Amino acid sequence: MKHNILIVEDDLTFATLLKTWLTKKGFATRTASSCASARKELESDKTDIVLCDMRLPDEDGINLVPWMRSNGYDTPLIIMTSYADIQNAVNAMKSGACDYISKPIRPEELLSKIKDIIGDGNQAAMQAAKPQKANATSHTEFIEGKSDAARQLYNYADLVAPTPMSVLINGASGTGKEYIAHRIHMHSKRADKPFVAIDCGSIPRELAASEFFGHIKGSFTGAIDDKTGAFVEADGGTLFLDEVGNLSYEVQVQLLRALQERRIRPIGSTKEIAVDVRLISATNENLPKAIEEGNFREDLFHRINEFTLQMPSLKDMNDDILLFANYFLDNANKELGRNISGFDKEASTFIRNYAWPGNLRQLKNCIKRATLLAEGEQITVSNLGLHMQETKGTKSDSLALKSEDDEKLRIITALQRTDNNKSKAAVLLGIDRKTLYNKLKLYDINTEE
């Protein structure tokens, strides 16, 4: 069955070329040159996708979306725009467009977007406007960038996903490594099996073997119950090891054995268990250097690194920064009960030009804090709490100060201002809750009334 595409474009030459190309690709296509004629086409014939120019003779193409929704049409609409303004694309998607594509249009990119919408009934068509949420194991939300650097990353991830290859994801903190790992899992042949994520940097050395392989009751002090390890939990699916470079040498040996033999033995058990996992690892360290220094096993490195993905830093995706910022703003509005409409012109320029050494995590925390502090309808530069001289090499932790006493005082002040509400205090400090709890423990700050 042919899918029906309506092209809404006032450039008749371009519309004809696009119509001819899509027809050759097997689609039934027709054209309209204005919003008014597009409405008539939608009323007169079945339409599966609308490709609509942003600027039309009678009105902006995005105005079709509310009309379609109010008249019962849930047809996906892709905005085509020659205006290289990310804010236009963001506004279009907020209004209900499922995606956008920039002119001059790259045919294969357009075909890929169309297939995403109609080629897989289980895949979210409105991926940019309503990003996919990872399963309960990873607790990750993400919005996909549209820049060349972002698209290359997703293309590589999708290329390796269906294979059994182990993947090593390199990238700085806060770049979204776990999201990419989950994306690979969801596009693999193991998508219906578990995705289990382990933060290797947070596991105490003495408990690492138990976390990976499990233990039986009474096998060591504190083992009051049987524990299922991550390998068994992820059996048939994907095991994601974040910050794998933090594993001790002894645990690296045990991990290598488990990967080679596909069998594990829980601590205290005499029985081995067969396991089948696809391994994805991530690190922000230089593992080849760690190998030279004797801190990481070379044989394990080759075992986990059959395919490498390099995460781009936020500064390398400049065209996506406002897209991400608006997404984080929407989330912050919902979480904090605010209704901030966006960023004023000065703040938008600042956000695009800032270095963001802490990448997406820093941007998210910054926008959340600014949403809480904003007094008007839009976020201003002063709400962001950043300084333009903070460029490359600056610490990403917004709390980091000149001394521990200064840091402790800021934490106490934030808690006082929020009546000991740790979530709101973390927002004011520009950090996440986990970091705040670690600081409370470090400085022995008692938050009880």
Image: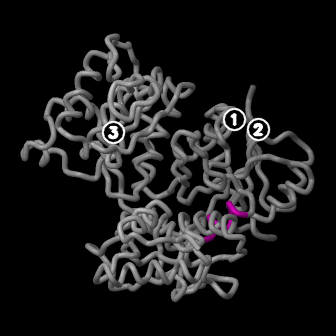
Secondary structure, mark 3, is: strand
Query: Which is closer to the viewer, label 2 or label 3?
Result: 3
Instruction: Tell me what residue is drawn at x 70 percent, y 57 percent.
Output: 12
On the question of residue 156 being in view, the answer is yes
Q: Is residue 19 above or below residue 433?
A: above
On the question of residue 319 being in view, the answer is no
Residue under numbered circle 2 = 4
In the drawing, does residue 446 fall left or right of residue 71?
left
Residue under numbered circle 3 = 281
Residue 165 found in image quarter: top left
How far is mark 1 from mark 3, CA to CA?
Answer: 41 Å
Secondary structure, mark 1, is: loop
**What amino acid is labelled 3 in the image?**
Ser
**What amino acid is labelled 1 in the image?**
Phe
Query: Which is closer to the viewer, label 1 or label 3?
Result: 3
Q: Is residue 280 above or below residue 105?
A: above
Colour convention: one colour
Q: Which mark is residue 27?
A: 1
Sooner in the amino-acid sequence: mark 2 or mark 3:
2
Neighbours of disc 1 within 10 Å: few (<14), some (14-19), many (20+): some
Front-most of 210 and 249?
210
Q: What are the residue bounds of the magenta stretch?
A: 86-94
Instruction: Tell me what residue is drawn at x 32 percent, y 17 percent.
Output: 262
Sooner in the amino-acid sequence: mark 1 or mark 3:
1
Secondary structure mainly formed by the magenta segment = helix
Neighbours of disc 3 within 10 Å: few (<14), some (14-19), many (20+): many
